[in-house]
Structure formats: structure tokens, C-alpha cells
Image (cartoon, rainbow, N blue to C red):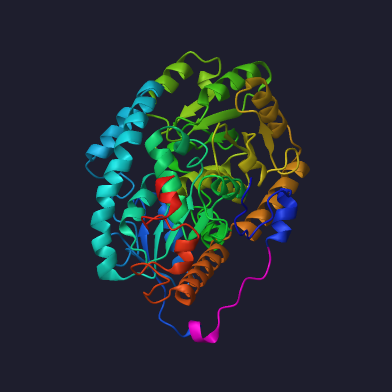
Amino acid sequence: MTRTAQRDTSPRISARERAQDLDEPRTEVSVVHSLAPPMRILLVADMRSPTTWGWVAAVRSAGVVVLGIDGLPWPENRPFGASGEGSLRSVKQRLRSFAGATPRRLRTTGKVRQVVGPFLASIKGRRIRRVVKRAKPDVVHALRIPCEAMAALAACPPAVPLAVSIWGNDLTLQASESYLTRRGTRRVLARTDLLFADCQRDIDLAGTCGLRPTTPTAVLPGGGGIDLVRVAEQDRTLISHLSDLAGPGHRLVVNARGCRSYVRNEILLDALSLLASDLDSRVRVVFVDSAHDATLRRSIEHHRLRSKIIVMGKRSPEEVFSLFRRAEVSVSITDHDGTPNSLLEAMAAGAIPVCGDLPSIREWIEPGKNGFLAPFNDPFAVADALRFALGLSDAERSAIKTENGQIIATRAERGSAGKHAAEKYGQLVMHREDFFLPVGKNTCAGVPAWSWREGYPGHPECPLRHG
């Protein structure tokens, strides 16, 4: 990497060392700013996503006012049907169901989205720009790059700071799949004034994809972290849909990743076939959010362990967390990922993680110490990892649960994450105010001189504009 962004975390340390080192003092907010009006953030994000609502809850807990793309305050609670349950299915939801029917359809709709998405994002961004001018937020924050940040790029005037979050595969997968998304990603990162990512790997990659070397960054959970207070109060009973299929004596292995192009469910099924002869008869494998995948269901019908595999539809975050609490093992085999929310939830709930061996996952899991990793394309290695996880003694399992609980409390607790994000917002606004100069011979049409000199992409003479 030729350029290094400002970091809040050290890039190459173990999960245990990172858990200790990240418990560092944050910059204190001055008394003057503590008496100022609360910061107002206009959030460009998918309102149906639990990850979005987790981020909103985190920054709200730190006193940040969150506005939606209509310029109005973000609702206190998720509207009924925001998750797609209990309401008429929209055209977009129907397309998602079609996409999830087979891997081929998933790839086809993905390619269409890569072409149509950036074009629609620019149209949506021009509409949001009018809201930005009317609402006058302190910061515009896009919660992922395709296509929210592309819309925010068109919506954000030069004088308004732009914060961007990177999710799991925004850079490793999405940005490389088409010319339009690649160009859009570089333009977004060149304009970004504050970058959030859920793993250091993505901060490093962003530095090679157009992010200015002086851009402040922060490594925080994309969904705002785990609300440990709520977790402690949550009912520990198992959801009724599962209790009919898995009794109290069963040992659960839960795959909560659903069916996505980067989730290797076929490798997991092959690994389970290898385990069939010596797998404990009490083990049950649960696939969550997978009932609509026709290919997966057909594969399970002919599988050696079909009587031990449970396929469930979409479940609420609370139900999934209850499932993790009941499970012995959480399994997630993917070929692209950042820090999955499901990984943090499983660690907080006490399920032993078994994941694909990716750099971003290694920031949380030390193989054999607090979880198990295996190459995502090797069913034999995945089978071994599952065998080790299921073969742990009670003392070993308890030690892993304790360690993972400490990691979550230190690095992914929602209140701490929200406070850190709010501090980053505040530092960005103060930095922007300090360097925003009046229009004159050293500035151009209201664009701050410091941004222009560093390659502000909105100016016609900026070299990044034509890159």
C-alpha cells in the first residue's frame, strides 16, 4: 500500500492484543462544544436493514440527531413492515425473491444492478440534494458505497462533509464487478471526508482505491455494535418455530448468513457429508433465511444428513440472537466478507465461531484460541473445523465464550461505538470549519482550499475528476 490513511487501530495484531489495545482514551470534547446544539446527521441508508437501525441506535445514544433522506428526524422505532414481514411485498422485494431462487438468477440480477444501480443513484442523489440544502445537516453519511454513497456523492454540496461506511464486500467484490461500480467507488472515496469500516483490511484497501491519505478513518462495527444491556435483558427462551424441530437435548450448528452470492453453502453441505459417519446423532444444522433458495433445498433433499438439517425462512434479529444462544457452533463460510454482524452476535451469545479464513475475519478470530477458520473452498478443512468445534470440552468451550465476551465488550459494545462515531463526526465538523476559507483568489467557488489542493473531485481542475 503506497498511501496510509489515519488509523484508530493497529493493522496487524492478534484478536486478543487488539481487544486490549483498542481500549484507548478518546479525544475529549471541549466544554464549548458540549454546550453546542446536538449534531445533525443526514443518513443515506436502507431503512429496512437491521444494520441501519443498529447504527442509528448507536449514534443516537451519543446524542446525535439522525435525519432521513426526507430531511425529517429518523423514526424512533422501525415501522411495521420495514423488514418486509407482514406487509404487501413491493416490486423490489419480489425481485429479491426471484434473485434468491437460484445462484444463476442471483448472478443475473446482480449484473443488472451493477449497471442500473449507479445510474439510479445519481438520479436519487439529485433529489436528496434539495433536501440537504433545506435541512442543512452537519454531515451527510452514506452507510455503504453501492449505491447509497453514490447517491450521497451527488447529493452532498462541497461545503457539507461527507462520511462513508464500507461494508463487507464493497471493495473486495462489488467494486471490481463492473466499470461503473469501480469508477463510482473511486469517485466516492476521493470525495470522502470521513471513512468508517468494520475491519482494518478495508481501511487499507480504501487507500489503494482513491481515499486521500489525510482522510480520518475509524474501525467500528457496521451495525453500531452489540447492545449488551439489551442482550442481558433479552428472554433466553428459544423461538417456537424451532422448538418443534429441535428438542432441548439437541446440539445446534447455526448458519445465519442466508443465500448470497458470496456465501458458500455448497461447501458447507459437502463438509457435512464428510462428517456424516461420525457426527453426533444429537447434532442439528440450521440454515436461517434460506427457505427461498430452491437450489439449496434440492441439495438438502438428496443429502446424507437431510434428517438433521433444518431450513428456516427469514427471522428477526432478536430471534437469530436467541438461536445463537441456543447453539453450540455458528458457521459462516464465505469467500468475501468484512466483519459480519452475525459473527459479533454469535460471539456475544456464546456460540463457537467457525468461519472462512479471510483477513477481515482474522482480525476477530485466532484459530484454535477463540474460534476456528478454514479455507472457504476446502470442504475437508471446513469439516475438520466443525469437528474441532463440536469436540471441545466444557472447560474449553467456557474459556472461548469468556474470551469472546471480553472482545465484544471491548471492541463492539454499542454505547462505546456510538460515542466514538459521534466524536469522529464532531472532529470532522470542527476540522471543516477551521479550514473552510472565504471565497477569494485562493479558493474556488466556495470549495475549501485545503480540499482542492488534496484533490477534491468536484472541481473541474482536480486531477481525480478525470482519473
Magenta highlight range: 23-33
Judge whether residue 331 is colored magenta. Answer: no
Looking at the image, which is closer to me, 458 or 12?
458
- Image label count: 0
Majority secondary structure of magenta residues: loop
Residue drawn where x is 40% and y is 46% of the image: 466
For this view, does 404 lie left or right of residue 79? right
For this view, does 397 lie left or right of residue 311? right
Q: Is 369 rendered above or below residue 154?
A: above
- Location of residue 215 in the rendering, given as x and y in whole percent from the top left corner: 54, 60
Residue drawn where x is 42% and y is 73% of the image: 39
Is residue 30 something that shows in the picture? Answer: yes
For this view, does 283 lie left or right of residue 431? right
Residue drawn where x is 22% and y is 37% of the image: 91
- Location of residue 194 in the rendering, given as x and y in whole percent from the top left corner: 49, 60
Q: In which quarter of the image is the C terminus?
A: top left
- Location of residue 88 in the rendering, given as x and y in whole percent from the top left corner: 21, 42
